Amino acid sequence: MKKISIIVPAYNEDKVLNMFYAEIKKVLDEIKNRYDYELIFIDDGSVDNTLEILKDKQKQNSKINIISFSRNFGKEAGIYAGLSNVTGDLALVIDADLQNDPKIILEMLEYIEEGYDTVTTIRNRKHEPKIKSFLATIFYRLMKGANSGNIQEGSQDFRMMTRQVVEAILELKEYNRFSKGIFSWVGFKTKYIEVENRKRAAGKTKWNFRGLIKYAIEGITSFTVKPLRIATVSGAVISVLSLILAIQIIMQTLIYGKDMPGYASTITSVLFIGGIQLVTIGILSEYVGKIYLEIKDRPKYIVKEKILGEKQNEENSK
């Protein structure tokens, strides 16, 4: 019997965990005759009752394993920690807030059995705010074809993978991780399932507009050098335009004599070029910062407490 390792990153999810467990348990009960499973909950430094609830659930179910971080390291670290600890033939990443419908797991398994290596979901943006959809489109266009595989617009971290795919992902050891890009970069035969947006079952979202912008910048600078190329091209275009303008001024002076330069056009040009320079310096700073963090070679996360279920302890002792 094959085994599925289900990775659930959780940060301050005490209001939804009971509902999540009840929903995913229904799905797991449907496939119990075909698949064994383990639930790997990653407590990402929660400051509410998340860890206490998980410990209570583990008393009820020996197939639950808990990895609790010393502080909040972020979802990327949680996903990496989960993948590093899977023991199953398949691995599944799913959020605890029930925005990922556990019932889709059944459909994912069908495609895996057909021969796909990865099955993932694509969010339907029909009911999303227009500004959010617009910015998301720009983000994915920047990422697409930027030496980062083929990242599908609206793709989610909610996905099922074979053990071979998991091992390939773990080969990428970088500190600044962008899972969507990594999942795409490793390749393999992938099936995309379109799903509708779902609201959180309970609790508050951890993603505000500022957080999403920061996440986008992190993703772009962690996984593509396209902004540097854009800055290079912009600099080259401005240099050519400046040369043409200089030639025009020289020709006008030779033909018509001296002319009093316009204050407004001068200030505009200086501010424009200065702005481009500052933006370029900012882009370079982002990449230098990434290099700085990579060179430090700090751990991606620190485990405060690792509580394995009895089932896992039995397997480790064999």
Image (spheres, rainbow, N blue to C red):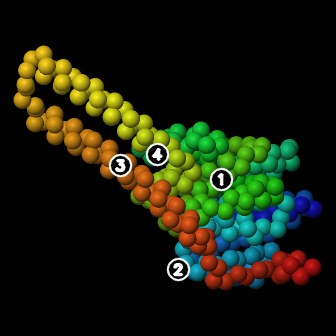
Badge 2 element: loop
1 or 3: tag closer to the N-terminus = 1
Q: What amino acid is labelled 3 in the image?
A: Val
Badge 4 element: helix
How many circles with numbers are drawn on the protein?
4
Task: Give the CA distance from mark 2 to mark 3.
Answer: 38 Å
User: What residue did someone put label 3 on?
Assistant: 279
Q: Are marks 2 and 4 in contact (CB under 8 Å)?
A: no
Q: In the image, is residue 74 above or below residue 238? A: below
2 or 3: tag closer to the N-terminus = 2
Task: Give the CA distance from mark 2 to mark 4.
Answer: 39 Å
Q: Residue at x 75, y 70 (%)?
A: 85
Picture quarter with the C terminus: bottom right
2 or 4: tag closer to the N-terminus = 2
Across and down, in percent, residue 193 comes to 69, 43
User: What residue did someone put label 4 on?
Assistant: 228
Task: Give the CA distance from mark 1 to mark 4.
Answer: 20 Å
Foreground mark, 1 or 2, reads 1
Q: Residue at x 93, y 62 (%)?
A: 1
Task: Give the CA distance from mark 1 to mark 3.
Answer: 27 Å
Foreground mark, 2 or 4, reads 4
Badge number at residue 47: 2
Visible in this render: residue 21? no
